[in-house]
Image (tube, helix red, strand yellow):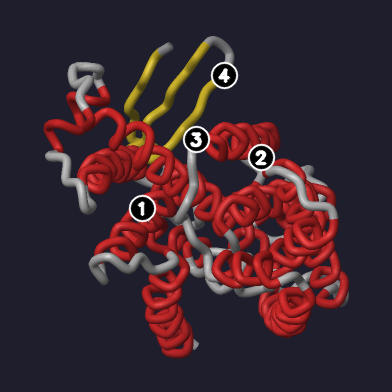
Amino acid sequence: MSVLADRIDFGRQQCVVRVGSLSARASLRAVVVVATLLTAIVVVAVIAIGMGKYTVAPLDVVRVLIGADTSFNRVVVLDWRMPRMLMAVLIGAALGNSGAVFQALTRNALGSPDIIGVNSGAYTGALVVIGGIGGGYYVVAAGALIGGLATAVTVYALAYRNGLAGHRLIVVGIGMSAVLNSVNQWIVIKLDHHTAVTASVWQQGTLNGLSWSQVLPMTVCLAAATATLLALGPRLPVLQMGDDAAGGLGLQPDRTRLAYLVAAVGLVAVACAAAGPIAFIALAAPQVARRLTRSPGVALAPSAAMGALLLLVSDVIAQQLFAGNELPVGAVTVCLGGAYLVYLLISQARQR
């Protein structure tokens, strides 16, 4: 493996990694930003694991993680708090990548899965499975995937007219999301009392009660969806150039877009099956990462790292904002994401 630094791409310094016949290229700034975000995730995770009614100092958390501490701290860190932290990172990364794909496909900063209704559709599919046949994580994830895909295909079909315009897709998606939210409320009302209460809390997006039993399935599903994105190669930036340019470069825009759509909905489904429809992470993470890296379009790795950090920080706020009363993390992301959405709408209005 070799890592080279070269000044190319109109004066931007690039990093090129070569492993045999394979190579990958990224701007040096993007590499530094991703490394900084990953470092911040580790620091916040160590601090978050130690916070709670039973406090564990950050140094003691590190000693537990490296196997140097076998006291009761080990139970607190590894059995009680570590799974929740890992799930926050995994779910945040999944939502960040999903948002990046949807925003690239729609070529619009508002084109995230929670805005265009995919989150609501995934939640509908999960509710149908929970209320109908029940089952474990994989079954619920499959139901969420089917619901999300059905929603995405429906929105795509309704918005398609001599091509796919990003603003038309967003408007149709907002309408579809409103319809699905009503359907979800109707399903919750029809469930038995215990399941309905659980579904109502889960609808807000929550990491409460997650354990090691959810970490492995989530990791497997996330790895499968990520592998699909990697298999598609560097086609996403080409799609962002428009269908005419993509076709001129040898891509089949509709088929390539469909493949990315399936992978992106899969990421939403695995996140929704674990923690419910967490809003606004997929909206904010790709755009914040894009501003930090100063890239011309959204990128997957920075978006995933930013999504993981945003959800992790939001979960810490949800746990510590009201001592003794944990909020669903979705309540925090809605507040933070709503403010960002207002800013995004104002900035786009000024640009026009």
Tell me: 12 left or right of 100.
left
- Three-letter code for the amino acid on which mark 4 is drawn: Leu
According to the picture, the residue beneath numbered tag 4 turns out to be 22
- Identify the mark nearer the N-term, 4 or 3: 4
- Identify the mark nearer the N-term, 2 or 4: 4
- Three-letter code for the amino acid on which mark 2 is drawn: Ala
Q: Secondary structure at mark 1?
A: helix
Mark 2, other Cα within 10 Å: few <14 / some 14–19 / many ≥20: many
Above or below: residue 79 compared with residue 102:
above
Front residue of 269/103: it is 269
- Identify the mark nearer the N-term, 1 or 4: 4
Q: CA distance from mark 1 to mark 3?
A: 17 Å
List x then y, in percent, for residue 140: 73, 50
Q: CA distance from mark 1 to mark 2?
A: 21 Å
- Residue at the image position 35 percent from the left and 42 percent from the top: 81
- Residue at the image position 52 percent from the left and 61 percent from the top: 282
Residue 225, labelled with which disc? 2
Residue 312, labelled with which disc? 1
Quarter of the image with the N terminus in it: top left
Q: CA distance from mark 1 to mark 4?
A: 33 Å
- Identify the mark nearer the N-term, 1 or 3: 3
Task: Count every numbered label the image shows and give the total.
Answer: 4
- Three-letter code for the amino acid on which mark 1 is drawn: Leu
Of labels 2 and 4, the one closer to you:
2
Mark 4, other Cα within 10 Å: few <14 / some 14–19 / many ≥20: few
